[in-house]
Image (cartoon, rainbow, N blue to C red):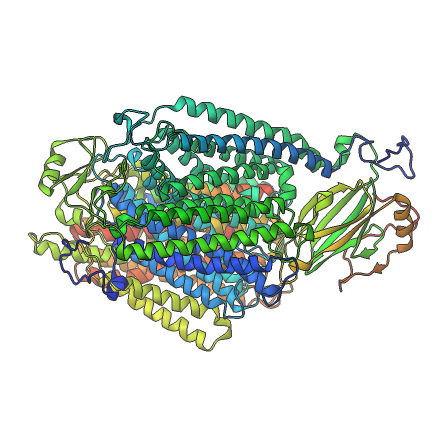
């Protein structure tokens, strides 16, 4: 199927992004601008996750409601984490 | 009673004991839940009476010193909140919801049986805890650090944590089941907004359950790990607060999880017994939806005194007051429904009306608690106790009404109305004698048996009320028992103005619920024959997402199984599909019995029992080992079993048309797993903030903890995900060899992941530096604990996947999963990719940052 | 209760009095708000419940009388309609929302006041208040004064702001003196602050309000409120010693204001 090429391309991107994240640790960014590095690294992870969810888990081709279920869980987890962390700042 | 549609199939009749152990039918399971939960109510109620007896005078102390009293109050709370009230509601949900939506059963019948047996065995484990050095004695809120072994060394404490974990498993299985059922198995023409009020309330309840209980599970697993392997979470800086966040994030939605089914019962009985449609029904439903959503953003109002900052207290004060508003609307809706009614004071209505009044009282006192300055004084006092008993037990009151309401449907006989009214009278007086004085005695601290003599008078009244309330139940038991034997027989519908589908079939309903297929497309309920229904389906093209008619091949459309694991069900599906392809003309029949749910859950019970005392060794090793072995046998048995639970070919399925039940169920499960990991990752982040973000990395983590093993593991896992994708591609191409090769690659890469991790961990366990002379292991410090436990939970998920692969690869070698059969492969993939995605976040959080 | 004159800008015995400096004791604040809520709550509850029962009685089933035509009654198997008649509902809902929201908004000012302590609301530059560290343990309370003195009976002067910094040595407790309307959680590893003003001398009781183990029910200590002079006398005799405590551990990290113990003031 034509999709095999797409999957392979995504796999390569995933590998490259992961290597990039590890690489950032070697740069100065993580020493001088820790939270910027944090944002970049987590941002890369998020993109990777979206790729795996959208293409490998097929969410792109499922009814949108399925994505909403997962986003609901994600939102609940984030609400708890951020509010709790903020409460002790 | 009709057994007309009991097509044999080795399904024992209701009178046989065996039936009750193997049944997967929703009505049977509903009855099992009702009876079991009532036993729990008696136990927890007895504990309450013992407490109230001791509270008759301040300073009485006959419960063998404080430990006895603390055990009683904790067990009373835990049993009532978890093991009585929701299961009682779900007894009704199981029995009634499929009837109300026009379905023949739940989506996953064996999973449903598993929910029940897990529930039952978890109760057993709880009861055993009393004999293991005393049960958990830290309150139902289980605050830290009282909940850790340092302060609660008795094995019974651990057992309760494990019993609760087992209970959460039951609840999660139940939520996945009900959500899939309600979304995918409604009668054609029954849109989501048309759901009857009780089914609507259950629908929202299970949504809340799905996410809330996952947070509790995270808390419990961490606490269990602290008990069993000594991780440091709740004893470090921020640990106490971490528990309160995790617990109350669950705890607040929990109170609505408890109340919503009661609200649904109230709405149904108000409509039926006033003979008026619910006023502003659309707004009532919207209010319920709002409450369900808002329930997740109010939890810190249980924490106003924990030292959190003023801004967040203000925010949560606002959200808390905000959540009282939809309830105002619902209360008024019910009141206005009575206007121009023709109200019959039947027992169900009396209990619902009584519940409404109790809820109004409880709700008003809740507004007091929402004003933070007042809450500062009410915290930890009987004001809170009185408030929550008024609202929660108001829910219980409505559910008792539900029991009277649906008793004729379930037994085919009418209860005695006079005794019912008598029950209500004694109940209502007893209830208020018990709880109202608590407002006068509100200064009494919670969970004490020593209090100021100025309050003794009120407590005496409360004790009298308690016994009166307890006694009233015996009127009910006598009534129901006698009526089951010799009550007046009823037909389909003994209640004038009832509208919902359960009243349109026999009492009790036949095995598959209705004669004919329920259908609402004509604007009201009608029953079609199979051919009529098919004809109607191919004729109409509604945008309501009616399932396809003849488009999908029969094998795929009709098979769905109800096992607990994705692969179990998926494999049985494949098995069944293989079978039906060769015997195409075989008529569909549904299975209703399996003994595997019982076996698996009993095995789980043994395993947890073994775990509870594992540090003491001896017989506990035996239990754990036996449990582990038996559950392996059970899961395989369940997967091999050919269990047929057909998905309806014609149903309202918006917004999940074309998403088969198994797939949808898997997605619901994965979403709760997101929250579970969210709880673990969130705990790590919270503790890291509490202990100093950078300090953590510089002082608590050894230099030896480097990024490279994590990166290698990331490569391995990503490659394994890719391999699964390739397996699916091979399945499309009908290449058995391709499937086997890809799945084997997945397996090898997964094993590589574990080996690499093992090497890494071994290395870290054995470092000897100045900072870490004894290595960096699970119990070294909070950083090590969070690292090993979180990545360990992830590794456990990997192991489960690998075990599933061990089952799938041999079958693939024999030709399974090719062609249209690839569904189970796809479901496995969903799980495996999820595990991969979690790692994509664990890697940076625990290695790089 | 006599209000003593406040010497402006004085150094010694420059004390803060309830009412005089515009500071209201949390106890007063609570009492007022509680009574308003109680009155309104009782009123609303009575009205709503009476109205409910009235309707339940008025529209009871009578064989011969049907207040509405049959067509408006629920029919078996019907699909629910949109559910009109929202107007009356929204009126009641709106009214109750207004009541509830204004009640809570009204308490917000008090919340800020209690939260930020008397310094903000009094507007005085130097505030002389008594700071006491409170340590909860299984199963009692230790009070540690600025001079290092540790006791298991809390002694405070009347009409003076008392700041308590509360923590725990073991599990999660909660410290509260009900009659003086002060309460806060006692959490191991962190310190929570609260404050109160005792407006009458006498003996009160401090309790534990969070289940903390077997001795939870017995975890009470006395709180003695005495006149300023009596307090000064007692305090100057303490000299940084322990007296009558049950605890076996010495206080950690308390700095004693060494030197002048006759100085009854602590910051």
Say how many tags the image has: 0
Residue at image location 76% in from the left, 35% down from the top? C118
Residue B648: image x %, image y %?
Answer: 19, 45
Q: Is B745 above or below relative to A73?
A: below
- The N terminus of chain B - image quarter: bottom left
Question: Looking at this rendering, what residue extends furthest in the bottom direction?
Answer: B618
Question: Looking at this rendering, what residue extends furthest in the front direction?
Answer: C64
One can see residue C170 in this view = no
Residue situated in front as seen by the camera: B734 or B592: B592
In the rendered structure, the answer to whether residue B245 lies left or right of residue C258 reads left
Q: Is B440 above or below relative to B487?
A: above
Residue B203: image x %, image y %?
Answer: 35, 42
Residue B795: image x %, image y %?
Answer: 42, 59
Residue situated in front as seen by the camera: B318 or C217: C217
Residue at image location 45% in from the left, 33% down from the top? C53
Residue A59: image x %, image y %?
Answer: 31, 41
Where, by quadrant of the figure, is residue B659 drawn? Answer: top left
Where, by quadrant of the figure, is residue B35 drawn? Answer: bottom left
Where, by quadrant of the figure, is residue B310 drawn? Answer: top right
In the rendered structure, the answer to whether residue B612 lies left or right of residue B719 reads right
One can see residue B658 in this view = yes
């Amino acid at each position: 199927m034509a999709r095999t090429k797409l999957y392979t391309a995504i796999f390569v991107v995933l590998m490259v992004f992961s290597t990039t994240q590890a690489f950032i640790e070697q740069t100065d960014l993580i020493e001088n601008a820790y939270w910027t590095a944090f944002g970049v690294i987590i941002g890369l992870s998020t993109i990777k996750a979206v790729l795996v969810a959208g293409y490998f888990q097929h969410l792109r081709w499922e009814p949108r409601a399925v994505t909403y279920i997962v986003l609901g869980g994600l939102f609940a987890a984030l609400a708890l984490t951020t509010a709790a962390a903020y409460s002790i700042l | 009673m009709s057994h007309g549609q009991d097509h044999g199939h080795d399904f024992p009749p209701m009178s046989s004991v065996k039936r009750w152990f193997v049944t997967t039918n929703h009505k049977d399971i509903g009855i099992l839940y009702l009876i079991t939960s009532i036993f729990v109510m008696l136990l927890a109620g007895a504990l309450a009476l013992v407490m109230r007896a001791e509270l008759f005078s301040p300073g009485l102390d006959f419960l063998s010193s404080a430990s006895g009293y603390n055990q009683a109050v904790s067990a009373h709370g835990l049993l009532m909140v978890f093991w009585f009230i929701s299961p009682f509601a779900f007894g009704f949900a199981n029995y009634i919801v499929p009837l109300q939506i026009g379905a023949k059963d739940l989506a996953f019948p064996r999973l449903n049986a598993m929910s029940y047996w897990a529930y039952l065995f978890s109760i057993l484990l709880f009861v055993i805890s009393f004999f293991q050095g005393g049960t958990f004695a830290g309150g139902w809120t289980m605050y830290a650090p009282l909940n850790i072994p340092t302060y609660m060394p008795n094995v019974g404490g651990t057992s309760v944590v494990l019993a609760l974990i087992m209970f959460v498993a039951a609840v999660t299985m139940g939520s996945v089941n009900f959500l899939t059922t309600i979304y995918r198995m409604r009668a054609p023409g029954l849109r989501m907004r048309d759901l009857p009020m009780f089914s609507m309330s259950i629908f929202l309840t299970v949504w809340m359950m799905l996410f809330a209980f996952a947070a509790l599970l995270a808390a419990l697993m961490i606490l269990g790990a602290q008990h069993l392997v000594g991780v440091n979470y709740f004893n470090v800086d921020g640990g106490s607060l971490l528990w309160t966040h995790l617990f109350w994030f669950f705890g607040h939605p929990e109170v609505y999880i408890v109340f919503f089914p009661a609200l649904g019962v109230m709405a149904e009985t108000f409509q039926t017994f006033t003979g008026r449609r619910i006023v502003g029904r659309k707004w009532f439903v919207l209010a319920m939806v709002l409450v369900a959503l808002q329930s997740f953003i109010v939890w810190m109002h249980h924490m106003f005194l924990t030292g959190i900052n003023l801004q967040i207290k203000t925010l949560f004060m606002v959200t808390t007051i905000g959540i009282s508003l939809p309830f105002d609307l619902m209360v008024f809706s019910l009141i206005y429904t009575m206007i121009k009614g023709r109200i019959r004071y039947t027992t169900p209505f009396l209990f619902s009306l009584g519940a409404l009044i109790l809820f109004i009282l409880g709700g008003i006192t809740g507004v007091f608690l929402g004003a933070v300055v007042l809450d500062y004084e009410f915290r930890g006092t009987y004001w809170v106790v009185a408030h929550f008993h008024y609202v929660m037990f108001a829910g219980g009151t409505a559910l008792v009404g539900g029991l009277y309401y649906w008793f004729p449907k379930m037994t085919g006989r009418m209860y005695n109305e006079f005794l019912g009214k008598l029950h209500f009278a004694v109940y209502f007086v007893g209830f208020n004698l018990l709880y109202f004085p608590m407002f006068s005695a509100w200064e009494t601290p919670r969970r004490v048996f020593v209090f100021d003599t100025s309050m003794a008078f009120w407590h005496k009244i409360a004790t009298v009320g308690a016994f009166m309330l307890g006694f009233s139940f015996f009127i009910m038991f006598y009534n129901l028992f006698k009526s089951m034997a010799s009550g007046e027989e009823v037909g389909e519908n003994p209640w004038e103005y009832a509208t919902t589908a359960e009243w349109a079939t026999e009492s009790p309903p036949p095995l598959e619920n209705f004669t004919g297929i329920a259908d609402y497309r004509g604007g009201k309920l009608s029953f079609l024959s199979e051919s009529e229904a098919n004809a109607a389906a191919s004729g109409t093209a509604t945008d309501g997402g009616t399932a396809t008619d003849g488009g999908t091949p029969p094998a795929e459309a009709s098979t769905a199984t109800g096992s607990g694991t994705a692969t179990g069900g998926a494999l049985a599906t494949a098995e069944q599909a293989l079978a039906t392809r060769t015997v195409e003309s075989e008529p569909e029949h549904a299975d209703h019995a399996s003994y595997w749910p019982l076996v698996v859950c009993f095995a789980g019970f043994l395993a947890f029992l073994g775990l509870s005392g594992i540090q003491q060794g001896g017989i506990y090793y035996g239990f754990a080992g036996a449990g582990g072995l038996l559950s392996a046998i059970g899961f395989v048995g369940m997967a091999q079993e050919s269990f047929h639970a057909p998905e309806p070919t014609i149903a309202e399925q918006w917004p999940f048309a074309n998403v088969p039940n198994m797939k949808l169920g898997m997605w619901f499960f994965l979403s709760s797993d997101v929250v579970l990991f969210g709880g673990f990752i969130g705990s790590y982040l919270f503790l890291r903030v509490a202990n100093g973000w950078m300090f953590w990395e510089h002082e608590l983590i050894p230099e030896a903890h480097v990024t490279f093993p994590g990166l290698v593991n990331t490569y391995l896992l990503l490659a394994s995900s890719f391999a699964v994708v390739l397996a699916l591609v091979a399945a499309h191409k009908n290449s058995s060899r391709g499937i086997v090769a890809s799945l084997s690659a997945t397996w090898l890469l997964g094993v590589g992941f574990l080996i690499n991790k093992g090497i890494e961990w071994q290395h870290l366990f054995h470092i000897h530096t100045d900072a870490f002379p004894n290595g960096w292991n699970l119990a070294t410090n909070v950083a090590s604990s969070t690292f090993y436990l979180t990545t360990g939970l992830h590794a456990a998920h990997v192991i489960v996947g690998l075990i599933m692969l061990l089952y799938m690869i041999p079958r693939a070698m024999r030709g399974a999963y090719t062609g249209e059969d690839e569904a189970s492969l796809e479901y496995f993939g969903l799980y495996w990719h999820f595990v991969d995605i979690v790692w994509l976040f664990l890697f940076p959080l625990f290695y790089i940052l | 209760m006599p209000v003593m004159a406040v010497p402006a800008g004085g150094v010694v015995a420059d004390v803060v009095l309830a009412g005089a400096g515009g500071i209201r004791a949390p106890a007063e604040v609570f009492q007022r708000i509680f009574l308003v809520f109680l009155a309104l709550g009782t009123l609303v509850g009575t009205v709503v419940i009476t109205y409910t029962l009235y309707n339940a009685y008025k529209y009871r089933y009578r064989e011969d009388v049907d207040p509405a035509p049959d067509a408006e009654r629920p029919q078996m198997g019907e699909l629910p309609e949109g559910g009109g008649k929202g107007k009356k509902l929204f009126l009641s809902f709106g009214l109750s929302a207004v009541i509830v929201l204004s009640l809570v908004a009204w308490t917000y000012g008090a919340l800020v006041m209690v939260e930020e302590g008397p310094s903000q609301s009094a507007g005085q530059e130097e505030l002389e208040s008594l700071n006491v560290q409170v340590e909860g343990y299984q199963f009692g309370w230790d009070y540690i004064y600025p001079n290092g003195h540790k006791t298991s009976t809390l002694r405070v002067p009347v009409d003076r702001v008392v700041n308590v910094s509360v923590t725990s040595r073991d599990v999660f407790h909660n410290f509260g003196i009900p009659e003086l309307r002060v309460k806060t959680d006692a959490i191991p590893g962190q310190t929570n602050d609260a404050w109160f003003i005792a407006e009458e001398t006498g003996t009160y009781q401090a309790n534990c309000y969070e289940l903390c183990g077997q001795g939870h029910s017995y975890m009470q200590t006395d709180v003695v409120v005495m006149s300023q002079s009596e307090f000064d006398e007692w305090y100057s005799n303490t000299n940084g010693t322990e007296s009558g405590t049950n605890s076996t551990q010495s206080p950690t990290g308390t700095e004693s204001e060494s030197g002048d113990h006759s100085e009854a003031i602590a910051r």
